[in-house]
Image: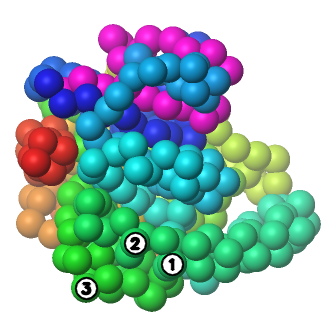
Amino acid sequence: MKRILVVVQNYPNNDGGVALMYVHTRNKYYVQHGLGVCVLNFSAEQGYFKDGVKVLSVEEYNESKEIYDVLVLHAPNVRNHYRFLKKNEKSFEHIVFFFHGHEVLKLSKTYPKPYDYMKTSSTARRIFQDCYDIFKLAIWRKYLPKLASKSDFIFVSKCFYDEFKYYTKINNNDLLNHIHIINNSVGEIFEEKKYDINTTKKYDYITIRNMLDESVYCVDLLCKVAENNPDKKFLLIGRGQYFLHYNKPKNIDWVDRFLSHEEMLAYIDQSKCALMLTRRDTQGVMSCELVTYGIPLITSDLPICHEIFDGVINVSFVNNDALCNVDISIEGVSKGTEKYNSDNTIGKEMKILSR
């Protein structure tokens, strides 16, 4: 049995923490299919088990004498992952990098401008971020090709891989063509259960976001859509301070907390359509979960959204720039997709990990 060490900045825990749940979904699948998995969580103060997956703190890993066949790094950063690699990479015969977004991008060039209330508190942070991004890109540009002969590099979309090449100046040949485009999988519950189109619908549109304060998630556009469609009922789920600074339209109900997947499904079944606008993305896992479940989805008319959703029957696209002046309509039908199921995503990863 191959033994895999998965290295992450953070990880779901037993106290309600859900950071990097998409990594945990993978790890459970790996275990179910015969791989030995242990997680090194840089943020953990002590070890624990999560759904049968062993999670170690840095101190516990350093004291451990375990030997692993494969090293897996998710969203690698310079502060922790790079330092770990420099110290330990010779101990692993095979290294697999999973790139998910910000870790190989220049954020000031790829992410939209923040909302006004976020600007005053983030000016110094943005300056620091720019300096850090220049530094991290230089590090990866120099270091990743050195590991290419024993590494694989997985990106969650082609659009994102194109951005990676642009900002790191690393191409296919530098990485010996060990490049793979594999979408993140969806949560198990979205595969196992299906949208109930026959239940009474309380809401016309549902939007689910982890953080409302990030302008990339278009809460401002959602509010304008609601204002322009006063006869429609909207549900917004997500944490944030947005409505401390801007008025909330009366036809938006807001759930200001994180929900379990089971709680989400109850709200989704009360809604006719999901409205998931974005100004940029690398994949959009929540949107993939919604269409897998089967609810019709309206998302933004962006190249990344077309890459991910073209051919999925229950998805429609709208232009962000024209959205506020038109009435949105549900053009999709209720029909789930298996495109993002574990067997079609993590199953591909298994072949790479097992080689």
Q: CA distance from mark 1 to mark 3?
A: 14 Å
Magenta segment boundaries in residue numbering:
35-53
Which residue occupies the foreground of this view, 155 or 318?
Answer: 155
Residue sitting nearer the eye, 5 or 166? 5
Nearest to the observer: residue 174 or residue 257: 174
Q: Amino acid at mark 1?
A: Lys
- Residue that appears at 83% across and 65% down: 125
Residue 149 located left or right of residue 55 = left
Q: Are marks 1 and 2 in contact (CB under 8 Å)?
A: yes
Report the Cα–Cα distance between label 3 and label 2: 12 Å
Instruction: Quadrant for residue 110, please give it.
Output: bottom right
Number of the label disc, if any, that sits on residue 292: none
Residue that label 2 marks: 146
What residue is rendered at 40% in x and 84% in y? Answer: 170
Q: Is residue 330 left or right of residue 245?
A: left
Q: Which quarter of the rendering shows the N terminus?
A: top left
Mark 1 sits on what residue? 142
| Dot 2: element | helix
Q: Amino acid at mark 2?
A: Lys
The residue at which mark 3 appears reads as 173
> What's the coloring here?
rainbow
Label 3 CA crowd tier, 10 Å (few <14, some 14–19, many 20+) = few
The mark that comes first in sequence, 1 or 3, is: 1
Label located before the other in sequence (3 or 2): 2
